[in-house]
Image: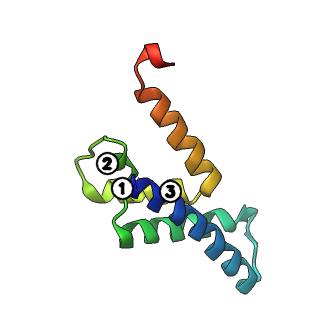
Amino acid sequence: MTALITIVLLATLVQYLVDIIKNIVPITEVKGVKLAPIYAALVGVVLACLTKTDILSALGYESGIEAAGWVITGLIVSGGSSAVHELISKLRESREPDELR
């Protein structure tokens, strides 16, 4: 449960930090590619790696490479807290027995 709370906090932190970066960096696009999602992905992956937060292991799945879980978590938190909440809900539903659905 602590890991899931950490993931939601990381997602909120990513949103906040990307807003700060967007205020500092005046360039919003390069050759038609918006930079905000790239900033979010980079910040998310860095924070997940620094905190060693792994959504896969928090939900009971094991990956063969520990860093893979951190990178996947970073990409997930880059979607923001609402995206993380929606994903966690769907993953929990998929793990419930059929008679509880």
Above or below for 9 versus 100 = below
Kind of residue sitting beneath label 2: Ser
Q: Nearer the viewer, mark 1 or mark 3?
A: 1
Please identify the quarter of the rendering in which residue 32 is found.
bottom right
Residue 57 image label: 2
Rounded to the nearest whole Å, what is the CA distance between mark 2 and mark 1?
6 Å
Residue 54 image label: 1
Task: Name the residue furthest top.
Answer: 99
Please identify the quarter of the rendering in which residue 70 is found.
bottom left
Residue 46 x %, y %: 44, 71
Q: Is residue 51 left or right of residue 65?
A: right
- Return the disc, 2 or 3, that comes first in the chain's sequence: 2
Q: Which residue is mark 3?
A: 75
Q: Which residue sits at x=35%, y=49%?
A: 58
Q: How many marks?
A: 3
Q: Is residue 65 left or right of residue 37?
A: left
Kind of residue sitting beneath label 3: Leu
